Amino acid sequence: MDTSIALMADQLTVKFVDTLDRYPCNEDIECKYTFNNYKVQDGDRIAIFKTGWKSLRNYVLFEWAVDSSVADVNSVVFSRYDLPNSPSETDDLYQFCYISGENVVQGISTPFQIYSFDSKHTVNLTDSLKNENQCTHLKQLLAHKDKEILRLKEENAILKESLKSMVDQRKFQRSKNYDDDIEQLKELTSKLKNVVLGQQKEIDALKSEVRKDKAEQKNLLLEKKLAERRFESACGKNVKRLNIDFDLGSLQSLPAFPFDDLDKM
């Protein structure tokens, strides 16, 4: 499978469980899976691909995905009548893939084999006891397939690690963008603080002028009261003087002493 196809989804949200290494082609295959914070969409499907597929069109067969709100594990069944059964097809390895309605890969299973044996290669306990050579050949075939499955599992683990690295990188980029936004907010906050400080200085200056005006007003009131007192005091003295002058002026002149009458006596 192309690495770019495996990394189309931001994160694998569907996990396949209880996937066997081998399935017989003459029996139905039950595919089990679980969701991790994923909601089924219209058009979601589970497809079987040959390992190494490069396009979503390379599917072998598919079933529409189902979501049971009751069960923790969901499943679909691939009919045995639709499974690959020719010798050339049963030698290949396959894997389940969960494809969303938007054609995004949401989950990938470990590889498995769909096997069949014709009449010349039918294996059961009785035949294996009768034909040791056939059993040896089968064991060699299984050992080869097991190695291939192990290799594919390792490749799958590498792809998942690459996907995780890409997700972490995106998270880091988002965090960096957040840091830039925070820095801009800090600069804006600093500018606003400077504006507030400037306005506070203007307010303090106005308060100082108000205090000066109040002090001057208080001094003027004091001077006014003193002037009024001086004025009242001056007015009182003038009134008293006028009263004295009035009393002296109102006295009548004494008549002249009659000296002539004394001479006549």
Image (cartoon, grey):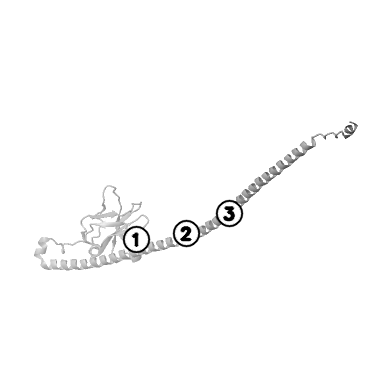
Residue pointed to by mark 1? 56
Amino acid type, mark 1:
Leu
Residue pointed to by mark 3? 208
Discs 1/2, front: 2
Residue pointed to by mark 2? 185
What is the quadrant of the N terminus in the image? Answer: bottom left
Image quadrant of residue 78?
bottom left
Q: Of 181 and 154, which appears nearest the observer?
A: 181
Q: Which is nearer the N-term, disc 3 or disc 2?
A: 2
Q: Of 150 and 228, which appears nearest the observer?
A: 228
- Number of labels in the image equals 3
Q: Which is nearer the N-term, disc 3 or disc 1?
A: 1
Discs 3/1, front: 3
- Please say if 2 is above or below 260: below
Badge 1: few (under 14), some or many (20 or more) residues near its Cα, within 10 Å? Answer: some
Image quadrant of residue 262?
top right
Q: Is residue 210 left or right of residue 238?
A: left
Q: Which is nearer the N-term, disc 1 or disc 2?
A: 1
**Whole-percent x, y for residue 261 in the image:** 89, 32
Amino acid type, mark 2:
Leu
**Whole-percent x, y for residue 175 in the image:** 40, 61
